[in-house]
Image (cartoon, rainbow, N blue to C red):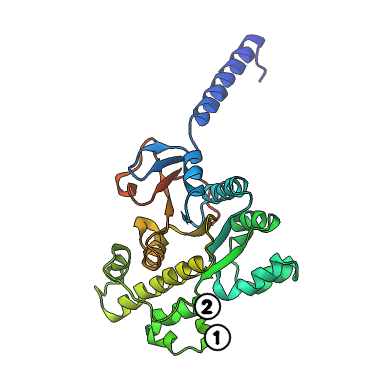
Amino acid sequence: MCLCRSNFRTLLIALAIIIGSSTTSFKEVPAYQVFNQKGKATDFEKLCEAAADADVICFGELHNNSMGHWLQLRLLKYLAAKKVNKVVVGAEMWEADDQIVLTEFAQGKITEKHLETEAKLWPNYALDYKPFFKFAWDNKIPVIATNIPRRYASMVMKKGMDSIAALPAEAKAWIAPLPVTFDLTLPGYKALTEGMGGHGGPMSANFAKSQAIKDATMAHFISKNLKPGVPFLHLNGSYHSNNFEGIVHYLLKGNNKLKVLTINMVEQENLEQLATENQGTATFIIAIPSDMHHSY
């Protein structure tokens, strides 16, 4: 069926109005919104400025949120420029016994293929983490593996702390110095014991301790690699630093004068204000739309 000229023109105008309205609407939707600890809206530049003045930055992420990973890279680029590459990075994603592989790759002794086959990469490494670490390596920024090898955390969960106390010295080199003290009354750990249904029973306590030994180990390797005036940017799941617990608890236990800045990444449908349950969870909270792309 043919359209007459006037009808065709009317159709074009209607389409232009629809497209124009849609475009305007989407332009008004922010990709993220930064809030301070009190829940007041701020911006990413202020977050970066504060991070440059910290000893340690725990960037609590949602592992599969692509926008969050891009913001991590933006923060690293800011710190590298602000501090003239005087910055160190570390991550939960690298287990401590991977350090020799990371160091050999950074020194050009092994190829990227060796790195990617011999280190224990997370499934979303190529999409979400590789750009961040590539920038670090390209700019000679030290990359530190901070997490306990997962096999040892699994031992704690299944058999308790005595199981790793019996490990040889070579294995203990990849764990926080033993014995590690646990405060299972901290809300984050307490929630794990209750979530397991044990209300403090042996199995639920071991589950909480398996997370705490991760936190203690990450704090240990962060502290071990701190340098005066050099920010340490650490990537970890939000759980491990939210509410200034987890890694932060162990960092400050070792040195209560450290300036630790935390970031919590959350997803919300509405970014105009921070949800009540997210307020106070970190020094800065980055709210991202709930329908943002996820890598898995």
Amino acid type, mark 1: Glu
x, y percent for residue 35: 40, 41
For the C terminus, the image quarter is bottom right
**Residue 210 to residue 130: above or below:** below
Element carrying mark 1: helix
Res 257 → quadrant: bottom left
Q: Residue at x 75, y 71 (%)?
A: 109
Whether residue 66 is visible here, answered yes or no, is yes
Left or right: residue 284 compared with residue 71:
left
Rendered image: mark on residue 19: none
Q: Which residue is mark 2?
A: 174
x, y percent for residue 15: 58, 21
Residue at far top of view: 6
Whether residue 122 is visible here, answered yes or no, is no
Residue at far left of view: 199
Q: Which residue is mark 1?
A: 170
**Residue 54 to residue 182: above or below:** above
Res 103 → quadrant: bottom right
x, y percent for residue 121: 60, 67
Q: Residue at x 44, y 85 (%)?
A: 164
Element carrying mark 2: loop
**Residue 96 to residue 9: above or below:** below
CB atoms of marks 1 and 2 within 8 Å: no
x, y percent for residue 106: 69, 65
Disc 2 crowd, CA 10 A, few/some/many (<14, 14-19, 20+): many
For the N terminus, the image quarter is top right
Amino acid type, mark 2: Trp
